[in-house]
Image: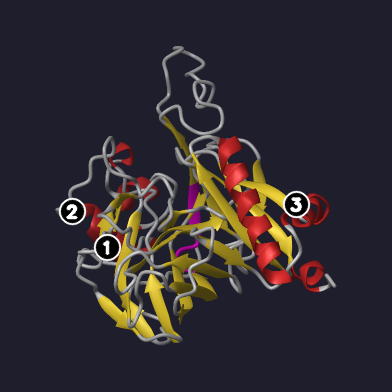
Amino acid sequence: MGALLQSGQGDRPGIYVPAGVDTVSWGWVAGPDAAPIAKVQPDEILTIDTVSHEGLLGDQGRDPVEFFGGFGVGADMVLADAAAIAASGIPHDQRRDGPHVVTGPVWVEGAEPGDVVTVEVLDLRLRVSYGVISNRHAKGALPGEMPEADPDSGAPVPLVTRFAAVAPGGGSAVVRAPSGPGLALPLRPFMGLVAVAPATGPAHSTPPGPHGGNLDVRPLGTGSRLHLPVRAEGALLQMGDPHFAQGDGEVALTALEGSLRAVVRVALRKAASPSWDLPYGETDDAWLLLGLHEDLDEAVRIATRAAVALVVERTGVDRATAYAWLSAAGDLSVSQVVDGVKGVHFSVPKAWLEAVG
């Protein structure tokens, strides 16, 4: 088993926020009245530890040492902060609360509604050398079909988990069944949940929304930027749901879930909330316009309208020309279909956008 990055160990640039009983919420994105656990100035670097919920949940025994021990992981290779959170008195009802362990909130000095906080991902470091992918509660893209019933008894199976050990060198993992061959998987770490506080109180951690949250947008890895319109004073930045890898759609319900340390730069742009008033992403090559809705078709419409608005505002062309250009130049992808509120992202290539003239 590979290296373990415990809380407080290793390189921690800038302001450091550990994940612990006093620095996380479980199942909820904190609202505008929550007390911040740290403060950052605009353009300051923030290092924030996050803990995966897998192995902590009630249907897994709420004991990561025992849970991961069932896959051959020694107790000395389980994160102490994960074990402490699971053993703590933090209330968590899996039927009511979201699954995610959320670190924060962090106050961004000077942030006010109407501003935009930008989270630039500088580095993502694996805290453990293993992760799991779970399908549970008849959720995912094939509810009622997966998980499959027990072949011997025909009884429903509420939870199926596949363990993945990270290969030496850290670039890939192998997803294995209890017996038989495994499947190789390249690692593409990113944070599934990045949020500011909602305007009117805490939000369930599962569905994403205007505050961001559980967006599950795969391209938002190292080098990316997520732009979050501020909903409350101080923004109250929060992060969780760390992923080692995920495909667009996240069809089985979870990604390859594993704890990460995120090193980010937090920027602030005053009075910069976009006309479409939703979070949006950016990589070196593309703008990522998000659409969020219970109805996947409506999510597509929301993302497409945002992409049209972006092209119009940046080039001055009319909406009809922008719409036509996007049909030939843009790429529309399904981010996830498993969080109640479904997500899509419309990728608008920067090079082609800048070539308009």
Q: Is residue 18 visible?
A: no
Residue 136 part of the magenta-drawn span: no
Tell me the magenta residue range: 126-132
Is 352 left, or right, of 56 in this rendering?
right
For badge 3, the amino acid type reads Tyr
As drawn, is 87 to the left or to the right of 41?
A: left
Q: Determine the secondary structure under disc 2.
A: loop
Q: Residues within 10 Å of mark 1 (few under 14, many from 20)?
A: many
The amino acid type found where label 1 is placed reads: Val
Q: Are marks 2 and 1 in contact (CB under 8 Å)?
A: yes
Residue ranking furthest to the top: 153
Earlier along the polypeptide chain: callout 3 or callout 1?
1
Q: For this rendering, which residue is in front, 299 or 114? A: 114
- The one of 145 and 238 positioned closer to us in this rendering: 238
Residue 94 makes an appearance in the image: yes
The image quarter containing residue 98 is top left
Task: Report the residue at 39% width, 68% height from top.
Answer: 230
- Numbered badge on residue 24: 1
SS for callout 3: helix
Spatial separation of the CA atoms under disc 3 and disc 1: 42 Å
In this figure, which residue is indicated by the disc labeled 2? 90
Residue named by callout 3: 323
Q: Is residue 65 above or below residue 251?
A: below
Mark toward the start of the polypeptide (3 vs 2): 2
In the rendered image, the residue lying farthest to the front is 318
- Percent across and percent down for residue 190 are 54, 62
Q: Amino acid at mark 2?
A: Ile
Residue 257 x/y as whole percent = 48, 52
